[in-house]
Every structure is written in C-alpha cells, then in structure tokens.
Image (tube, rainbow, N blue to C red):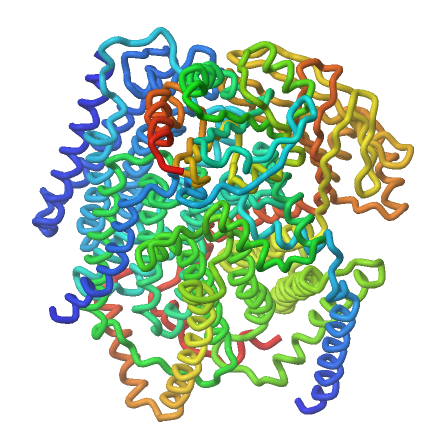
Amino acid sequence: MRRSLWSLVVAAPLVALLALGFRHDPNAPYLPLLGRPAPAFTLQTLDGRSVSLSTFRGRPVVINFWASWCTSCRVEHRYLAQSWRDFSPRGVTFLGIAYDDSVGAARAFLKAHGGGWVSLEDPGGQTAVDYGVSGVPETVFIDRRGIVRFRSPGPVAPGGAMSPAEMARDIATLLRSRA
Amino acid sequence: MRRHLGWIAIGWLVLLGALALVAYGSPSPHPSLSEQARSVAAQIRCPACHGETVEESQTAIAASIRRLIRSQLAAGRTPAEIESFLVSRYGSQILLSPPASGIGDIAWLAPPLLVVGGFGLLVTLVADWRRRARRPPRRAADEYLERVRAELAMEGPE
Amino acid sequence: MISFLGHLSIVLALVAAAGGAVAAFAAPHAPGRTRWARRSAYLVAGLTGLAVAVMEVALVTHDFSVSYVAEHGSRETPLYYTVISLWGALDGSILFWAFLLAVVTVAFVRLSGSRHGALQPHATAILLAINSFFLFVVAFPGDPFVPVSAPPADGPGPNVLLQNNWMMGVHPVLVYLGYVTLSVPFALVVASLARGVPDAETMRLVRRWALLPWTFLSLGIVGGMWWAYTVLGWGGYWSWDPVENASVMPWLVTTAFLHSIQVQERRQMLKTWTLSLVIAAFLLSILGTFLTRSGVVVSVHTFTQSAIGPLFLGFFAVALVLSLALLFGRSRALAAPGALESSICRETAFLVNNLLLVGITFTILLGTLFPLLAEALQGSQLSVGAPYFNQVAVPIGVALLFLMGVGPVLPWGAARLDEVQYRLLGPVAIGVMVILSLLAVGVRGVGALVTFGLGGFVLAVTLERVLADIRARRAGTGESWPRAAVRLLAAAPRRYGGYLAHVGVILAVIGIAASQTYGVRTIATLRPGQSASLAGYRLLYEGWTPLPGAGKMVARGRVILYRGRDELGTLSPSVNIYPSQAVVTPAVRSEPAGMVSDLFRGNSPLPQLSQLLRGRNPFEDVYVVLGGLASTPRGPAELSIIVNPMVGFIWLGGIMLGLGGLVALLPARRRRTAFARELETLPLQREEAAV
C-alpha cells in the first residue's frame, strides 16, 4: 500500500506542470518592443522625400504598417482615417509604412481609399523587421519620448485585434504623456 | 572459428576506410555566405506561420527576415548577434531551439544523459543476469515437471 | 427534435456505459452481472452509432438547428467533405472517438469471449469506464447537439484547409483508430494487475491487441505526412508540431513493447518494464489528445481552448495515478530473477532497442512540453522546433538503424562475438559498397551517406535472414522456393511481419534523409511565357485561369515541365480563394509515379527513361506552388519551386509498415499445446536447427 502511494509523488509534478499551462495562452500574440524605444528609421515617401522618425520627437506618433494587397488593411483604413481626422489637429503624427508593396500600387490604394497622412516606402521590409512586425496590418503607438506604448497586432477595426474605441483611448493616453 | 578472424579484421578496415572517405568527401568547414545565412534562418521561427522556419517559409515577412540575416552577415555580425537582435524584436520564442545555457541545459542534456545513464544501467543489469546464469539452477527438472502437471490438470483434454 | 434525439442517445449511452462498468467492477464473478456488462457494451455501441448517424444526417441535410452543423456546415461544401466534417472540429471529433471506442469495446467483448473468463469482466469494465469518460465529455462540455434557437440560413463550412484533399477522410480515422485500440491492451494489463499478475496467455492477448494500434498509427502517421506534403504547400512533410509528436510517441512506445514482449515470452524477464510500456502508450495517447484540445501548447492542430482541456487533464491524472499505483503495488510480485548466458544475444539487442526508443520518446516529450516548463520555472516564452528535435532525436534514431541490422543476426540465448561479426561481414560489405558507389557518382554529405550505407546494411541483413530461413526449411522439407516462402510466412507471420516493418522503416528513413539533404528550392516571379530553372529542370509558366467553384474562386495555374529538350508533363498548381483567405494547392510530379501514369494515359515513357541514362535521379519530385497572384491572369505570379529527391520512398516505406503490421496480425498456422509452447521458451544455444 505504501508503495502504491508513491504513484502520487511521481504523477504530481507532471500533472502540475500541465495544469500550469492553462494560465497563459501561448497562442496569444506577443507584442514586441512594448516599453522600449521605437527604432529609428529614415525612409522615402511615395513622392521621394526623405522622412526620419527623429523629427517627430516630442509628439505622439502612430505608425501603421499596411500594404495594398492586404484585405484587412482595406477594412481598417476608414477607422484609421477617422482617427487621423480626430487626432491629427491635436498634434499626433500619423505615418503609414507600405510593406512589400510597389509605389504604384500603394498610390492607387491611397487614391481609392483616401487618407491624408504621409505614407513611406519600406523596400525589403527591413523597417518592419526592426519593429517586430509579423504581418500586415499592424499599428504601433509611440509616445512623446519615443517609447512604444501600445501595439495592435492586427487590424484596428470592430472584431479586429484592436477596436477603434481602444485606439482612441490609447492615442489620448499618448497625448497626455510628457515629452 | 579463429579462421574467421582474418575476414573480420578486413571487414572492419574496409568499413573504417569507407567512413573516412565519406568524411573526406563532405563539404568544407568554411561555409559560404548563403550557406551561413541558410543555417541561421533555419533556427528562426517564421512569426507569421505555425512552426515553419524562416528558411522554408514563403511568407513576405520570412523573406524580409532572410534579407536581414544576409545583410547583417555581410556586415560582419555573428549568428549569435543576429539571433539576439531578432529576439530583441520578436521575443524569445522566435528562436526554434532552447538556449544553449540556463534553462536550455535541461533540454539539451537530459536526453543524452538519459540514454547514457540507461545504457550504464543496462550494462549492470546484464552483468547481474549473467552472474545468475552461472550459478547452477536448483531443482530445475522438478520445477518443469511440476508445471507440466499443473498445466495438464488445468487444460484438460485439448 | 434531431438535436434532442442525438443528445438523448449520448446521455443514454453514458448511463449504459457507466452502469455496465459498475456492474462489471462490482461482481465480476456473478455470471448474470457479467452478461449485463457485455450487453451494455453492445448498447453503448448502438446508441453512440445512432448519435453519429443523427449527426451525419443533420450535416448532410444542412440542418442548422444543430449547433455543430451551424458552426461547421455549409450548403456549398461538397458532399464528401460534409460527411467527413464530422471529425473536422473539436466536438464532432470527440463524438467520433466515442463511437470508435464503443465499436472496439464490442469487438473486444466478442473476440475474447470464451477464453479469459476470469479476466474479461474487469477488462470490459475498464473499457466501459473509458467510454464513460468520453461520452461524458460529449454529453456535457463538448455537446455538438446543442439546439440553435435561430438557425442561420447557411453556415461557414469546415476549415478550408480540411477541404483540400480526400486524405482528410482517411488520416484522422486511422490515427483515432490507433489511439482507440490502445485502450484494449491497457485495459487488459490494468485488469490483470488489479487481480494479481498477468499470465502468459494474457500477455499473448495483449501482444495481439497491441499490433492493431501499431498498424493503425503507422499508416495514420505516414498518411498525415503525405497529406501535409501534398496539401499544405510548403514542400515538407513533418514539422515536429505537438500534434504530430502526440501521434508518434505512442507509436514509438508500442514498437518498444512489441520487442520487449518477445524477451518476456522467452525468458519471463522484464515484466514490469513491458507492462509499463503498454500503460505508457495509452497514457501518451491521452496526453496527446489533451495537448491538442487544451490549447496549452502552440500547435497548428489546436482545436481551440475550451472547458474540455481540464477534463482531459483530470482523466489523464486519474489514469496515471491508478496505473502507477497498480504497478508499484505489484512490483514485488512481478519481479522475476533474470538470467542470461551471454551478453551478446538478441535479448540484449532488444534491451538496447527499448532504451533507444524510449530515449527518442523522452526527447520528443521533453521538447514538446519544454515551453510549458520554461514558462513555469522562468516565466520566459520559448519555442522548440525542428532544430532541437533533429539534433537530439535523430542521432538516437541512427543508432537504432544500426541495431536493426544487428538484432536479427543475433540468436536468442548466446552467441560468440567473432561468429556474429563473421555473419555481419556480408551485409557490412554491402553497406560499404553502397557508400562507395554513391561517392563515386558524386553524392556528398556525411549524414545522408551514412544513412544510405546503414540502409543497405539493414536491407542486406533482412534479406539474408529470410533467405537463410527458406534455405533451412527447404533442407528439411525439400519444398520449392515459393512454397517454402509461403509456408514460412504462414508458420511465423510475426517474424516476417517484423522484417517487412524493418524494410518499411529503412525505406522511409532513406527517403527522409535524401529529401532533407538534397532538396533544393527557389522562388521565381514570372509572367506568362517566362521560365525558371532548377536542378536541371525548366518550368515554363503559362498563366492561370479562373474557375468558379462552390464558395470559392479557383485560380488554376499551368506550368510545363521540361528537362533538357524533353517535355515531362504539365503541372497545375492552384490557389483556392475564399472570401476570408487564400489556400494554395501545390502541384507535384513524382517520378516514377509520373512515368507510370503517363503510360496509362498512353504517353510514351521514353523521354523520361532516356533521362535516366543521362544521369537524372529517377525518384525525384518536382513541386510547384503558385502564389503572389496579380489581379489579372496575364500579370506576374510568384512560383515556389522545390525539387525533392526520393520522397516517394517515404510513402512506400509507410505502405510496407502497414503491410508488416497486417502480416504480423495473421494467425499462426500451428495449434500447439501449452507444453509445446513452454518448450519453445527454453533458452537455446543456437537459433537454427541443424542445417
């Protein structure tokens, strides 16, 4: 009988380990760079001008990685545009980075769907990798000190990775942050 | 069977020779840039897929990461530096192998230790069994007779 | 109404199963109650079958008032995929599992009826208890029959990845059958441990029943690899995903059992170990199911997190504790003093075999659970994938390959080292010749060459053993070669089934080594009319045509394959574009299957055969995936091209494995008395009789 009780001793660690697995969902996306400085970059706009992230230090920045071939980007675009209309007058910079896209296709998308914020070209996707992007669309929210505060690992849309209401709240928090 | 010893010796020599040739004919230990890039990429998990490596995945982000690996290698970075850069951007789960130290020790060392330890256990067990075989069996004939009788009683007519 | 009927059947089946289990546990000696236990097994199978039939009817008639149909059915899905969507999602798959388990329980009850009178009630009780668990899960947390108050007009349909290939109807069934049939040897072992110590007759029964899951899992695993290769479009067949690992671990442990049981039958040794293997195989299948359905590890197969996970963990924990308690409790009674005349014998080889197989299983288990361990101990999120498993498990596998050639040569009992080495000379020479010939034609790569050499070695050993057996028989009976071969097979099907399985493993390993080492790939962006080259092939891209389909638009590409000036055929990789996602279907041309199918179509195989003479590998796959489509068919597209040598060997090896299992299941011809069987277990100095 005593020997049989050893079965509990042997089984307990394994079962406990498996039970611990319920605490955390490993399929939940990992949000990179949270709380860390946003990596610097200098990219060309679709018209050929050069833009650096450092120019916007002191203002909140919202960077949206997108592509013309991505269907969910089409869905989230109007919510981004609304957000731009709401917050850009209050000093928030919106930047779009076209990932793995041709200039012509990107321009055509913007012409069809509107959106007055600057869009940059990321040839080879190296800036996307620098920002830990897994796919498009992804949106990064940076505060006045250049620290990444929030991320949306998917489209910002109802039913997407982040709701438009949440985005508005996050941008408001960025505005309240200090330079 | 001593006359076989000669053949056995020849056999071992031929085998050794073949293995030496195989090792000799294998690719050189100085891999080219693209070979190095492929081996680094094979250690990186594609962040947009389930379980595929960056080397084999056809998604756009995998291609971008491959490009990054190649350019960083060309700039003189070591594979370890590239891996830690990617970890700083994508988190530690971007690497497909447990780390070589720390908690990763459990993963890398436990299986070989188990196999080697098990082999040692086997050796002692077999030695034990051989020792027991050399002791003369006690009343073996009676034992078998007993069992035959018992079995015939149980089975009845076949 | 139909929901109610289905749910009611399950609840009644649960009551019958639980009742039958209690009855059988409570008074196994009262024949009346034993009969009730058997009857309840029939009842459970009937009711569960009814529930499955009800679900199928609901699926096929698109009755969206049933929750499972509303979540996974669609009017646009073809009939075949609608029928097999029964097991395409979590709730339905557990219902299907419960049904298969009930059928297997009935099969056990019928097939072991008259013999094992004393053991059968307990074993049936355990099987019914396992049935109860699964039925409980189907009845409550995993109920697919929940009535939907406002049935939609149409549903989303099954996961699009599961609609791409007919194999989806075969591979899961085989794997489930493998898991389900593992319950029977487990039940037998646990029942006999509860009553005392299993006798030789019980172990014989366990051995026969263990061959079934082994065969099903072999076919299911290789079938899954084939499906992944042909359907998923990344040109690979194995990714060490937790669910793949979950199917391989019970298979490895069952393989170890099939070897160690032979040592136990002959020597009455290793009883505790052998029984542990049977228990471990069943527990690993439950563990694997838990990992799949709980969402605690990242897996492409994870069905989704739900309340079912904790239930499976609980069941696993209970089964683990009970089995260990029984094993520990009986360990003294099971211990048998073993004796070996020599350390060089087949017994030792089988011991090393078991060590290596368990070593691989441990590695796979550790690697699969390591992310959990790292999170629990350190809080860090780690991944464990192919590089780890390849570096740790594969070397153990190579050692096992070597053993496959040495084991059959060693006799039972005792052997002399120089004699064994002499016997191995011929096969070793063949292995070396294989390596040297490959080197001579320019093949390079240490790992692959060693694998090929070992493969040749093992094939030579197996062939030599079979020929020696036939020769020995002919010397005694004077029969012709074919007749002697057939008679031998009938007399000892397990041995020749085992040899077939060894050959299957070698073929699969050769295929894996070749395709992993020498596979090449490239990605080319082509417009219609442009070509890409790889490994001596030229692929001419001709564009794609849109084909409307049920609920999707299919873009079928057209690629013409050339080698030199010879046209080898047309490949049609396609992309299925659904509203929410695009799923690729790769096109593969495998030789020599391609040559054979050309023959059937009336095309001459001469162009391909002439390729052989010009040094082309006759066993290569050319694999094309279409992607990156522009909006018009005349625009550029991205073609991923992969050339994989000898992948067909893996499928061939899988078929041999299955064949070996089936052969081993054949009943041996001779009826022997118990005493005669006893005589056979006496240790012999030399395996062959006088030749």
The residue furthest top is C153
Q: Position of residue A32 (x, y in %)?
A: 45, 42
Residue C651 lies, with reference to residue C435, above or below; the image says above
**Residue C287 seen by the camera:** yes
Q: Quadrant of residue C57?
A: top left
Instruction: Identify whether C15 is placed above or below C24.
Output: above
Quadrant (top left, top right, bottom left, bottom right) of the N terminus of chain A: bottom left
Total tally of numbered discs in the picture: 0
Observer-nearest of A106 and C116 = A106
Say which residue appears at 42% left-offset and 36% top-offset: A144
Between C31 and C651, the residue placed more toward the observer is C651
Q: Is residue C346 left or right of residue C7?
A: right
Residue in the foreground of this view, choosing between C59 and C671: C59
Q: Residue A49 appears at what percent x and percent y?
A: 67, 27
- Is C111 left, or right, of C159 in this rendering? left
Return the x and y of residue A142 as percentages of the image width and height.
44, 35
**Residue C215 appears in view:** no
Q: Could you tell me which residue is drawn at 47 percent across and 53 percent down? A: C384
- Left or right, C445 with respect to C381, comes to right
Residue B148 lies, in percent from the top left, at 28, 74
Say if A53 sits above or below C626 in the image: below
Q: Point out the image quarter for the C terminus of chain A.
A: top left
Residue at x 60% of width, y 30% of height = A99
- Judge left or right: residue C524 versus residue C151: right
Depth order, front residue of C477/B117 = B117
